[in-house]
Image: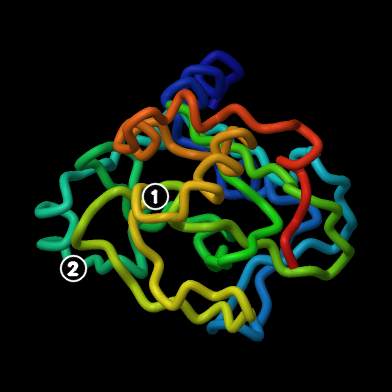
Amino acid sequence: MDSIDVVAWCQTGSWKPQQKLSQYLFLYVAPSAASGLGLFTSRPFQAGSTVLSVTDPDYLSRAMSHAEITAAGFSHADIFQVGSDLFIPPYGGPDDFTNHSCEPNCGLRVRADGFSMVALCDIRANEELTYDYSTHQEHPAEDMECACGLRTCRGLVRSFSTLPAQLRRRYLAQGIVAGFAAEGVAGFAAEAVLSEADSLVCRF
């Protein structure tokens, strides 16, 4: 394959495995104290920094309705909501193993061509990375039992609109709530008014 063909091939979005995995430097999958396997970091991160940034022009290309994705055999343990009735199956990267926590140390910011994971507080080396699934969930059929085991565990992972108002405001201020989920809350724009200092404090 000559250089012109290589460029054309890359522009199709057909990435080599090593190109995809190179976006996951310092991250690894290991047993989680909370549930099965989890995503961990081998290096520390400061609050506000980007822990992981994945770019893939075809990131949303496999999005399906809830009826379609469940008919394909996927359950809420597998899928990720990206629209009011759009879900994607496992992406095929280590981040597929990211667990939920009711007191997460990370948050997700999803784009049309991928997503970023940001640190909500200082993260130690070899700490598990978690996010609150409810920040990207707004669907009545997607409730699931929580296994985070924290003192503040809510017991159930439910839609963003079901969260306490104070928690919704904090997540909105941190910019880690999916647009479709935020729009499901009346007055969501007003709820985002919160001090930047408060928005970056982990509640452990």
Q: Earlier in the sequence, mark 2 or mark 1?
A: 2
Query: Identity of the amino acid at label 1?
Result: Phe
Residue at the spot of label 2: 73
Residue drawn at the location 76% of the way across and 42% of the way down: 198
Q: Residue at x 54, y 36 (%)?
A: 172
Residue 85 appears left or right of 128: left
Compared with 24, 30 (above or below) is below
The residue shown at (53%, 27%) is 1
Residue 96 x %, y %: 50, 61
Q: Nearer the viewer, mark 2 or mark 1?
A: 1
Q: Quadrant of the C terminus?
A: bottom right
Quarter of image, res 4: top right
Where does the image place residue 165, in percent across and percent down from the top left?
Answer: 47, 47
76 or 97, which lies in front? 76
Q: Where does the image place residue 161, in percent across and percent down from the top left?
A: 35, 48
Question: In the figure, 108 relative to 175: above or below?
Answer: below
The residue at 48%/25% (across/down) is: 190
Residue 200 vs residue 28, the one in the foreground: 200
Q: Nearer the viewer, residue 8 or 193?
A: 193
* Circle 2: residue type: Gly
- Residue 188, labelled with which disc? none
Disc 1 marks which residue?
A: 160
